[in-house]
Image (cartoon, rainbow, N blue to C red):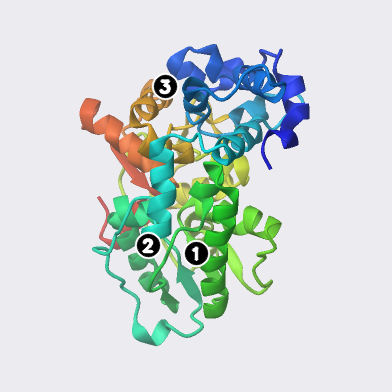
Amino acid sequence: MGIDHVREVIKNCRFCFMCRHACPTFLATKLDSHTPRGYALMLSEISDGIRDWTDDFVKKFYQCSQCGLCREDCEFHWPEDELVRHAREDIVEKNREPQKVKNVLQSIQVTGSPFGNDSDNKLNSRPENQHHPEIVYFPGCSTRYYHPEIISATENMLEHCRVSWMRMENEECCGMPLYDLGYTQEAKQQAKKTYDKLVEIHPRIILTGCPHCLRNFREIYPNWQLSFPKDIQILHVSQFLQEKILDRSLIFHHKVSLKSVSYHDPCQLGRKLGIFDAPRFVVRDIVGQAPTELFHSREKAECCGAGSIQFFIDSELSQKIVKVRMNSVLEEKSQVLITACQNCKTVFQSFIEKDFPSMQVMDIVELANLEFEGGE
């Protein structure tokens, strides 16, 4: 645990400038300390005992969104995003993390969510679905707290699919925010609680619209000996929609009339999990044409500024980063921006409400729901 695991990355990244232009945080702040090289230089000094963790160093390491664009741009694919995460483990071990980061841990331990209680969001699954349903819909913490409209749209979509589904009575955090923030042991403990509940229900499909939960279930849980049984599929909503369109369980009649539609690739869903085509397939099937590609898209898509729950622990920086990404949207003269991550929607919506109120931002399942509601 900690920076001993990334000494090779430190050695190779501390004198290299090549991915500097790719870092969304650097593009927003223009500070070299926010580049992978800057992080590697700081860690080099700390690991060699030249310096200790200062408040400024700590702050910088919690201003990385861990989007992984630097790794994608690197000729040798050095995992600079993992370098930051291991540095955070070291910060946590030395009890130097910022209070806002500690608050996330405390909130999850007390309420089961980084954002506190969200009891106002009522369950909508039928009682007869509670035992071994076909699908467990797992919205995730930030969807429950910030985006009840995404939950409603997903539930409406499931009803149209005529499948047996449910939501967990006391859904808690999957553990991903803790893992991102350096609380690895606490993340494992939280993950075990969620894993045990899901395995006990044993649905055929665990469905989520949150790419962070999706990656945790698919990639991180198995590293912690928490692999789901092989007869349980773990799907993102966009993948589920694609499946239902292909097997003709859902048929869209192009009632939705939208012009200048663009699609933003979420970092976790796209770059980290490689899910690029399913969302585009769904948009094309509903709207009748492919979404406009932004200047940087697919593997090279820039972060929206929400990663590592940045929008929650450093909203000012998050808004600077989203402004950079929105420049690509504005260049394409997009009127509607579709994404497939609720955190992306949070920061995009916050930005356009102030400066571009005529623009629409929606999650991909909300786009599908427009047709169920009669089109727009």
Specify few, some or many for label 3: CA neighbours under 10 Å numbering under 14, 14-19, or 20 or more. some
Please identify the quadrant where the N terminus is shown. top right
Q: Mark 1 falls on what kind of element?
A: strand
Give the spatial CA distance, label 2 vs label 3: 30 Å
Give the spatial CA distance, label 1 vs label 3: 31 Å
- Image quarter for residue 91? top right
Is 372 located above or below residue 14 in the figure?
below
Is 151 located above or below residue 313 in the figure?
below
Mark before the other along the chain sequence, 2 or 3: 2
* Residue 220 seen in the figure: yes
Is 313 located above or below residue 281 in the figure?
above
Q: Residue at x 43, y 40 (%)?
A: 101
Q: Position of residue 370 (x, y in %)?
A: 30, 55
Q: Nearer the viewer, residue 276 or 27?
A: 27
Give the spatial CA distance, label 1 vs label 2: 10 Å
Q: Which residue is mark 2?
A: 154
Of the numbered discs in the image, which one, if any, rests on residue 207?
A: 1
Q: Position of residue 18 (x, y in %)?
A: 67, 15
- Image quarter for residue 99? top left
Q: Residue at x 66, y 12 (%)?
A: 17
Q: Position of residue 203 (x, y in %)?
A: 54, 76
Mark before the other along the chain sequence, 1 or 2: 2
Residue 258 is left or right of residue 41, and the answer is left
Q: Residue at x 44, y 32 (%)?
A: 304
